Amino acid sequence: MYDNMYENENMDAAVEETEMTAPTNESKADKFVRLAPPRVNKVIQGLQSLKKLSAHSSYEYTEEQTQKMFAAIRNELDECEAAFKPKEEKKTESFSF
């Protein structure tokens, strides 16, 4: 139990260190390549930690609770994915009588 807590703290420290050690002349593409993997890995670790709550021998939960939990996660994931898609140009229709 406590080992996992320390693993999460170590991951947090690794993400912070990676984000703080940016070269001064780094391109936007290089910055993305540097920052994305530790952030994605942190999300994956969070989901793996969440999955451990599914152990019926240790936890009790309802279907309603799990539905709410996964709906919140899906909503946030959908919003995140949408942020990476090209923005659609708003079509301005001309006004006339």
Image (cartoon, rainbow, N blue to C red):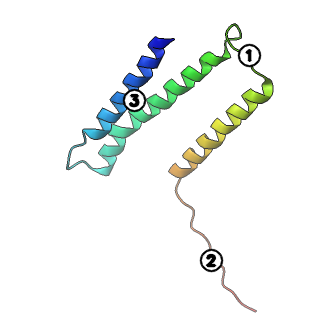
SS class of the residue under badge 1? loop
Q: Position of residue 37 (x, y in %)?
A: 40, 33
Residue 54's quadrant in the figure? top right
Residue at which label 3 appears: 12
Residue at which label 1 appears: 60
Q: Position of residue 90 (x, y in %)?
A: 60, 70
Tell me which label, 1 or 3, sits earlier in the chain: 3
The mark lying in front, picked from 2 and 1, is 1
Residue 76 drawn above or below residue 58: below
Extreme-left residue of the structure: 24
Q: Residue at horizontal 54%, vertical 60%?
A: 87
Extreme-front residue of the structure: 2
> What kind of residue is marked 1?
Glu
Pick the front one: 87 or 3:
3
Looking at the rendering, in which quadrant would you find the C terminus? bottom right
Tell me which label, 2 or 3, sits earlier in the chain: 3
Residue at which label 2 appears: 92
SS class of the residue under badge 2? loop
> What kind of residue is marked 2?
Thr
Residue 91 drawn above or below residue 2: below
Q: Residue at horizontal 62%, vertical 73%?
A: 91
Q: Measure how far apart labels 1 and 3 are at the Cα level.
A: 29 Å
Q: Residue at horizontal 44%, vertical 23%?
A: 8
Q: Measure how far apart labels 2 and 1 are at the Cα level.
A: 53 Å
> What kind of residue is marked 3?
Asp
Q: Residue at horizontal 75%, vertical 28%?
A: 65
